[in-house]
Amino acid sequence: MKLRVLLLPGDGIGPEIAAAARGVIELCARKAGHDIAWSEGLIGYAAFDRHGDTMPEATWKQLAACDAVLFGAVGLPERDRATPPEMRPEKRALLPMRQRMGLAVNIRPVRVYPGLEALSPLKDDIARGVNLTFYRELTGDMYFGRRERSADGQRAADECAYTRAEIARIARSAFAHAGAARLKVTSVDKANVLGAVGLFWREVVEDVQRREFPGVELEHCLVDAFNLYLFTRPASFRIVLTSNMFGDILSDGAAGIAGSLGLLPSASLNPDNGFSLYEPSGGSAPDIAGQGVANPLAMILSGALMLRHAFRDEAAAARLELAVERALAAGARTGDLLRGAPPAGARRLGTQGMADAVAAFL
Ligand code: IPM
Ligand code: MN
């Protein structure tokens, strides 16, 4: 398959992990017979320094002319302080991109790799085998509802609203994945109190399951209880279906279980037209940027998600994921993975060294 992939490295460690990951992704895609037509664009402060805009018109044009995006990171706390809120990358680039490109389905896998249990802040026996994937709704909820500020300055409100179609869309994606892999779906809501992300959410999710995915096991969990279980029995969850706001909060907490953000990929899909964006969960990490030590695995694993969801090549995606697993099992470690008690054979590698270690297993 041939697809046009736009690389948006962005800020901080974005450019270095993008450069290292690109080679590995290209290699895996080529071996599977795919043809990636790469292009590159500017976003975040990288774009601001050239065009005076963290999301220039030129980048919107590139987005309209590609099939998928591989995204590094945006935002630099130091620059944010000197930048008006509406020009900061999350407000100017990230959220508008989600909305305008219709990226309603956000997929965030969290895995504790065999042998990396010591990295987790949880006890080994609780962290062992954690392998869950969030399906977070990404274009609704309080993120995009009406905002109000009363004239007297004494009241503010963020509307939380969902349509049946929006809930059904994210539910379908979660059930489809769960069904194909024979996994249980845990839907997280606040049905004991709230309307939109409560009773209505639960009703629509049940409806989609009953009509379209009767063979898929579904359980409901209240968000406060789920937050507790995430730290007491995280390995008992596989597919977690939830709203935009709950998904934002819970997926960061779950990321903490893995012990390093450098390992966690993500995908955001437009289920109507197939457009998709892939990015590491980690952010721009300005404290280690430019040193060649950042972990490229989250970006490489985001490339695996791209092979799975954009190229629809499950086998190639699984090969790339297995290559990462093998490199880790062989002792390949970036600095972020050397906390705790690293195994005897652990080797400290830089960004490119880690990418090469993965490529060696392809
Ligand atoms: C995320 C981020 C964003 C969000 C911010 C940067 C707007 O935290 O992708 O989870 O809240 O969705
Ligand atoms: Mn977040």
Image (cartoon, rainbow, N blue to C red):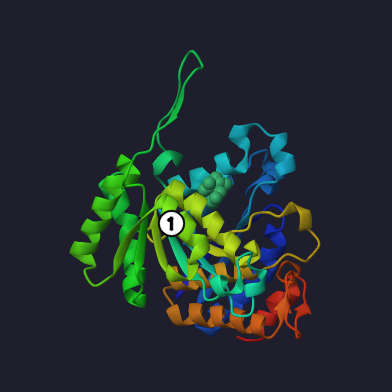
Q: Nearer the viewer, residue 19 or 73?
A: 73
Residue beneath label 1, please?
A: 226
Residue drawn at (60%, 66%), measured in percent from left and top?
122
Q: Nearer the viewer, residue 217 or 232?
A: 232
Q: Nearer the viewer, residue 303 or 208?
A: 208
- In what quadrant of the picture does the N terminus appear? bottom left
Residue drawn at (49%, 13%), measured in percent from left and top?
152
**Residue 29 visible (yes or no):** yes
**Residue 279 visible (yes or no):** no
Q: Quadrant of residue 29?
A: bottom right
Residue 61: x percent and y percent?
52, 49
Residue drawn at (30%, 65%), measured in percent from left and top?
218
Residue 158: x percent and y percent?
43, 32
Judge whether 286 appears above or below 22 on screen. Answer: above
Residue 226: x percent and y percent?
43, 56
Q: How many labels sit on residues?
A: 1
Q: Residue furthest right?
A: 291
Identify which amino acid the numbered label 1 is placed on. Answer: Phe
- In what quadrant of the picture does the C terminus appear? bottom right
Judge whether 254 appears above or below 81 on screen. Answer: below
Judge whether 343 appears above or below 309 on screen. Answer: below
